[in-house]
């Protein structure tokens, strides 16, 4: 059995970047990830929470970077790049001598033996720095419904409130993208009487993912003056995500495409909504638009100025919602199964193992 050292986001491997990626491969194969002494391994995998330079200087085995965010395609301002490196240096995931965080990333990409990214768009950017770049998306099978999940009984259905719900889930710092559509969404919720579930945290860091604090309810009240009482903030757990998805009619994923970092996000969040069997409306970032075309769901792509009209259209059409659900589940079954993702991890890690034995 291959020995894999891993520098994770979380020591218990419960962060989504661990749980839905390398950790699910390890659970599937029976392999153990060495997170206490990662250098005692055949292959070393570094998450984006690792100080790449620190580990690359010490590694004697092949090193794989697991980069799921598009930092190198963001082209941040010098001030933002320097500030990000300062914050990450404080968190010990970079060093001040790099000055800019992108300097650290570029050097790590060039020195690594392979890099895993989460989208074709990210692969095109990273390939400038390394010839061995693989695309592996998150494994969302934890969100799949099975016979152990409760189906609402007729009695339960009769007690279900008549209000229909939109659904959104994610880290608190990604709530900022709601500001883009707040006026349209506030109008839609108020005029239609629909509600919205936000599966997230009640508060989250203000800067850099680490510093300060923002109250989620305060944001909701500011952005949705007419409909804020129709919006429920639900603490994020897998069980809560699945149960509230079952009670929802549609999911939405607004993304401000002028945010270069967000625009380079992979299709992971969209695919997670499809695993929850939710017809989903979403912004036209490159990865979402690509998958929409592949899945024949171009009508679910919503331009910034169209949210009110498109929400109204799908809210009034059970047929269109059902068709989106059917197409998305077909796409998942052909392109995004647990088995396919595990094979991709096998290819990368066994390839690195052969390199170590040469």
Image: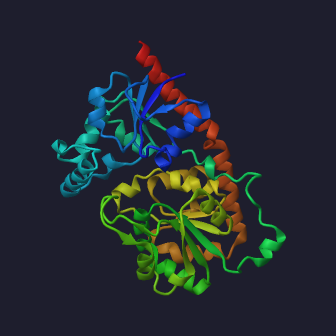
Q: In the picture, residue 309 is in which quadrant?
A: bottom right
> Residue lying farthest front?
36
> Residue lying farthest top?
358
- 71 vs 313, left or right, is left
Instruction: From the viewer's side, name the closer residue of 69 and 41.
Output: 41
Q: Residue at x 55, y 51 (%)?
A: 291
Q: Residue at x 60, y 30 (%)?
A: 29
Instruction: From the viewer's side, name the closer residue of 294 and 1.
Output: 1
Instruction: From the viewer's side, name the closer residue of 88 and 302.
Output: 88
Q: Is residue 129 visible?
A: no
The N terminus lies in quadrant:
top right
Q: How is the image coloured?
A: rainbow
- 136 vs 177, left or right, is right
Image coordinates of residue 58 in percent, x first then y, are 29, 27
Q: In the picture, residue 217 is in which quadrant?
A: bottom left
**Vertical placement of 118 versus 155: above or below?**
above
Image coordinates of residue 319 in percent, x first then y, are 72, 68
Looking at the rendered structure, the number of numbered marks drawn on it comes to 0
- 137 vs 239, left or right, is left
**Vertical placement of 288 versus 105: above or below?**
below
Image coordinates of residue 67 in percent, x first then y, are 40, 42
Image coordinates of residue 300 in percent, x first then y, are 58, 63
Q: Is residue 356 visible?
A: yes
The C terminus lies in quadrant:
top left
- 120 vs 280, left or right, is left
């Amino acid at each position: 059995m291959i020995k894999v050292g891993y520098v994770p986001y979380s020591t218990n491997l419960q962060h989504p970047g661990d749980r839905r990626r390398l950790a699910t491969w390890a659970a599937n194969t029976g392999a153990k990830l060495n997170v206490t002494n990662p250098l005692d391994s055949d292959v070393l995998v570094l998450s984006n929470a690792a100080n790449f330079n620190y580990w690359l200087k010490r590694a004697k085995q092949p090193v794989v970077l697991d980069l799921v965010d598009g930092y190198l395609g963001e082209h941040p301002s010098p001030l933002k790049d320097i500030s990000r490196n300062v914050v990450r240096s404080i968190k010990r995931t970079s060093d001040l001598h790099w000055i800019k965080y992108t300097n650290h990333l570029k050097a790590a990409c060039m020195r690594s033996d392979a890099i895993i990214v989460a989208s074709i768009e990210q692969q095109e950017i990273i390939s400038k720095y390394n010839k061995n770049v693989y695309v592996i998306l998150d494994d969302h099978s934890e969100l799949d419904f099975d016979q152990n999940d409760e189906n609402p009984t007729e009695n339960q259905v009769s007690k279900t409130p008549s209000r229909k719900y939109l659904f959104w889930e994610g880290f608190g710092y990604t709530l900022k993208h709601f500001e883009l559509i707040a006026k349209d969404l506030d109008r839609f919720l108020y005029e239609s009487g629909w509600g919205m579930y936000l599966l997230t945290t009640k508060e989250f860091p203000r800067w850099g993912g680490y510093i300060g604090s923002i109250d989620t309810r305060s944001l909701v009240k500011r952005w949705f003056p007419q409909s804020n009482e129709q919006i429920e903030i639900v603490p994020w757990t897998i069980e809560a995500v699945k149960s509230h998805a079952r009670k929802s009619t549609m999911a939405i994923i607004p993304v401000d495409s002028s945010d270069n970092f967000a625009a380079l996000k992979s299709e992971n969040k969209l695919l997670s909504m499809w695993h929850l069997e939710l017809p989903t409306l979403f912004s036209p970032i490159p990865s979402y638009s690509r998958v929409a075309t592949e899945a024949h769901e171009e009508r679910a792509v919503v331009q910034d100025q169209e949210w009110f009209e498109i929400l109204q259209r799908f809210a009034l059409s059970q047929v269109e919602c059902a068709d989106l659900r059917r197409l998305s589940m077909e796409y998942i079954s052909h392109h995004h199964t647990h088995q396919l993702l595990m094979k991709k991890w096998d290819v990368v890690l066994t390839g690195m193992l052969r390199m170590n034995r040469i």
